Amino acid sequence: MQRTEDGQTVRLVDYRPTDFVLLGVAMTLKLFEGRAEVLARLSLERRPGVSANAPLHLDGDELVLESLVLDGAPLAPETYEATPDRLMVRGLPESGRFELAVETRIAPEANSKLMGLFRSNGIWCTQCEAEGFRRITYFLDRPDVLAPYRVRIEADKAAAPVLLGNGNPVDSGELADGRHYAVWDDPFNKPSYLFAVVAGDLDLLADEFVTMSGRKVTLGIYTEKGRSEQAGYAMDALKRSMAWDERRFGREYDLDVFNVVAIADFNMGAMENKGLNVFNHKYVLLDPDIATDTDYAGVETVIAHEYFHNWTGNRITCRDWFQLCLKEGLTVFRDQEFSADERERTVQRIGSVRRLKAHQFPEDQGPLQHPVRPAEYREINNFYTATVYDKGAELVRMIATIVGPQDFRKGMDLYFERHDGEAATIEDFITCFEDAAKTDLSQFALWYAQAGTPTLTVTESWDAKARRHEVTLRQSLARGTAGTGLEPMVLPVRFGLVGGNGEDSVADGQVAGSAKLKDDLIVLTGREATITFNDLPDRPYLSILRDFSAPVTLDHEQSEAARLALARLDPNLFNRWRALDDLVAEAMTTAAKRAPGDTSPALKPVVIEALIALAGDDGLDPAFRAQGLALPGESDIARQIAENVDPDRVHEVVDAARAAIGTAGHAVLERLRDEFASSKEFSPDAASAGRRALSNAALGYISAATRDPGPAIAQYQSATNMTDRSAALAILAHRFPGDPQTERALDDFYRRYEADDLVLDKWFTLQATAPAHDTLETVKRLAAHPRFTMRNPNRVRALVGAFAAANQVAFHRADGAGYEWVAEKLVALDGINPQVSARTATTFRAWRSFEPGRRAKLEQTLRQVSETKGLSKDLQDIVDRSLK
Ligand code: 0A1
Ligand code: ZN
C-alpha cells in the first residue's frame, strides 16, 4: 500500500508493486431505478516472492459488500474484513490463479460527487479517474494494475435502450421483465481508471473512419435526446484527430469502435476511457446559434486531447499518480501541435502562452506550488493542475526543441515501441529521447522535480567600434512553498538578431560560460553564459525567447525603441506580438502601482500607435491582429505587481487604457469593425473566427471610447451567430452595467435561450463577471434563480467559479463581502461535490499578494473555511496548503 501511517500523505518514494497480480476482470452491472448491483470476478495470483500469508488489500469508497466468493465457495466471515473503504482478505492461495467474486451494491442516484457510477439527467454514467472505480467495486484501484475486462450491463430496455462499455461489443439480447443486456469486451490491458459504462436513452450520430492500414472503425457520438445534430463538428474534429495522429506520430486506432458520450453533469472537460470517451457536453455540442468561436476551438481541442490519450495514457499509462504529467503533459503537447497544424501556429502558440501565464504561473508562484511531478499528495484530484498539464506540455516542447524534430519523432517512436502495454514513468520517457538523440538529459529532468518559474535575465552590450554584440543570460530560481531544489536547469532559448531591414543577421557567436549555441538556439545549462557576436553591420535588435521556448519569467531590459522596432520588424511573429504585449503589460503594471488618484495615462501615444498599426496591418492574419489587441487581463497585471495589489486600481488602469486606445485608434478600429464583421454565412474555420475576433475586439474599444452602448445594442440585435451576439452582450454587461438597454438585452438573451443549458451558463457568467462592486448583489440574486443549481458543475463554474476567478473588482471588494459569499457557497458545495468545491477554492490562493486590508480578510476567510468541521479531503487540502 502506498498510503503512509497517518493515512493522509502518499509519497512517490514509497512506491512498490502490489502483492497480487490481476490477470483479468469479468463484471456484471445490473442497473435498476434507485440502485445498482455489481458483481466483479477478479482473476488474481500472488506475485512470486510475496509471503504466503500476506493478505489482499482492496480499495473501496462508500461501498456495501453483499457477498464474497473464492473459487466458487463463499468465504467465511473470519477470513475477511470489509468496511466502506477497504476490503482485506486473508488465507488466499499461496500460488496459482484464483478467482475472487465480489458483490457490491451502490446508489448511483445519490452520487452527487460524480465519481464512480452516477446518473446525469437519467443517464447512467461512470467516472473512474483517478480513484472512482473503488466507488463501484472493491479493487486494486491504482494505475499500475492492468488487465483485460469483459463487462455485462443489464438494464430496463425502455429506460436504457443504449448500453455501452469499453472495447468491442460482443453480445446483446433480451431478458425478462422488459430488461436487456449487452456484453463488451476490451482485449487491451488497462488500469481501472479507464473503465467506463454508460446506459440510457441516447441519440446517436454515427460515422466511420478507415485507418491507415485499411481497418474500418465505427464511430459514434451519443447525446441526450434531440441533440445529436449538434455533434457534427465534434465528429469532424474526431476524424481529423485520427488522421493527424497517423500522419504526425504514426499512431493508428486499435479497436473496432470508438464511442463518445456527451453528458450534462461532469466534473472536468472529458475523460479518455478506452474506446468510450465520456465528455462534458459543453465540449461536444455546438451550432452557430448557441456556440462561440471559442467554444468551437474548445471542442476541437478536447476531442483531440481525449483521442490522443489512446496512445499517450491508455496504451502506455502511468505507473502511479505521481507520473500524471507523463500522460497529461504529453497529451496537451500533442493537442497543441494538432491545433497548430489545423489552425494557425503562431496564434495557437500565443493562446497557449497566455493560458500558461494566466493559470500556471500564479500556481507556480503561490502556496499551491508543486513540481510537474509532485513528490507527495494528500488528494490526487487536486493535482489535475495547470502545472501538471500546461507546464508538463512545455517540458515536452523543450525536449523537442533541444533534440530537434527528427530525434524527437525517433524518441516518441521508441517510447511507443518500448512501453506499449505498460505503466511507465517519467524516467522511461526521458530515456527514450536520450537514446534517440544520444544525449544526456539528466539535468533536464530537474524540470520535473523543481517547482517554481525560473527567471531568465538577459543583458546586452553593444560595442559600436568593434561591431560586436554581447548577450548575457542568467538564470535563477527562488525557493517557493514546495521547498524543492534550486539547481540551474536546462533552458532552450531561441533567438534572433534582427536588423533594421527586418531580417535576422547570420552571425556566429562565441560562448563563454555554460551554454551551447547552435543556429538560432542557445541552450543555457549553467547559471550564466555570455555569447559574443562579431562583425555585425549595425546594432541588432535582440529578439529573445522566441515562441516562448522555455517557461520562464523573462527579465530583459530593452529600450522602448527596440521593442517598438521588434513589434514592427521581428520575422518571428510570436515575438512581434510579445514585444508589444510586454510593453503594454509593463506600462499598466507601473501605472497600477502609482498612488490612487494619479490618473496619468498608462500607455504612451507611441505604444498605442504601435498597437493600432499592428491591428491595422492588412498583411497580417486577422486572428493574430486580434491577439495583438487583447490587453493583458487584470489578474495578469495583479500577478506582475506581486504585492500590495489593489484590484480597483488595476481595473481603473485597464479601463482607462482601453478607452485611450479606442479614442486614438478610432478610425482604424471603425474600419476593422466594418470590414471584418460577419458575413451571413457562418463557418467555424480558424480564418473566419479570426475575422470575427478582430471585428469584435474593435467594437469593444469603440464602445469603451465613446461610452455609447448603441453599436453593441445594434450588433446584439442583428447578430446571426453566438460569437457576435455574446460579444455584444459582454460589452453591454461589462461596460454598461445597469443601463436599461443592457437589462433589456440580458432579458432577451434569457428568453431566447432559456431552453439551452449551455447558453444559460453564458448568461450567468456574463453577469457574474461584470466589473462593478454591486455585481455581488447580482450574483446573490442569480444564486437564488430557479435555474441555478449546485448539482451541475458547469452551472456552479458559470456563476460561483466565474465570479471568484474572473471578477477582480467584485470578488475582491474591499469590505470582504465577496470572499464571505464565495466561502459560504464553497462549504455548501463541498457537501455535494468536493472536487468542484476544491477547485473553486483555489481562487483564494493569491491572498498574500493583496494590500493589507484585503489580505487580512482573505486570510480570515480561508481560516474560517479551514476550521469548518467535516470538510472533504479535497477542500481541506486546498485551503490548508493555501494558508501555508
Ligand atoms: N484525464 C482527463 C481529465 C480528468 C481527470 C479527472 C476526472 O475526474 C473527474 C475527469 C477527467 C483528461 O485529461 O482529459
Ligand atoms: Zn488528459
Image (cartoon, rainbow, N blue to C red):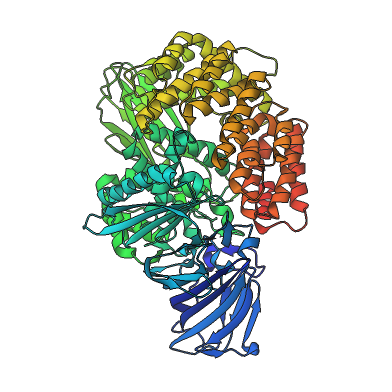
Where is 584 relative to 143, above or below?
above
Instruction: Residue at 29% x, 55% y: name it.
Output: 251
Residue 443 at least partly seen: no
Residue 741 figure quarter:
top right
- 567 or 800, which is in the foreground? 800
In the picture, measured across the screen, residue 879 lies left or right of residue 441, that is: right
Name the spot of residue 375 as percent of width and height, x first.
54, 58
In the picture, measured across the screen, residue 101 lies left or right of residue 326, that is: right
Circle count = 0
Name the spot of residue 336 as percent of width and height, x first.
39, 42
- 275 or 252, which is in the foreground? 275
Residue 651 figure quarter:
top right
- 186 or 533, which is in the foreground? 186
Residue 735 at least partly seen: yes
Where is 410 relative to 684, above or below?
below
Direction front: furthest residue: 177
Quarter of the image for the N terminus: give it.
Answer: bottom right
Name the spot of residue 253 as percent of width and height, x first.
31, 58
Instruction: Residue at 58% x, 86% y: name it.
Output: 90
Where is 761 relative to 437, above or below?
above
Direction left: furthest residue: 213
- 644 or 508, which is in the foreground? 644
Name the spot of residue 438 as percent of width and height, x first.
27, 54
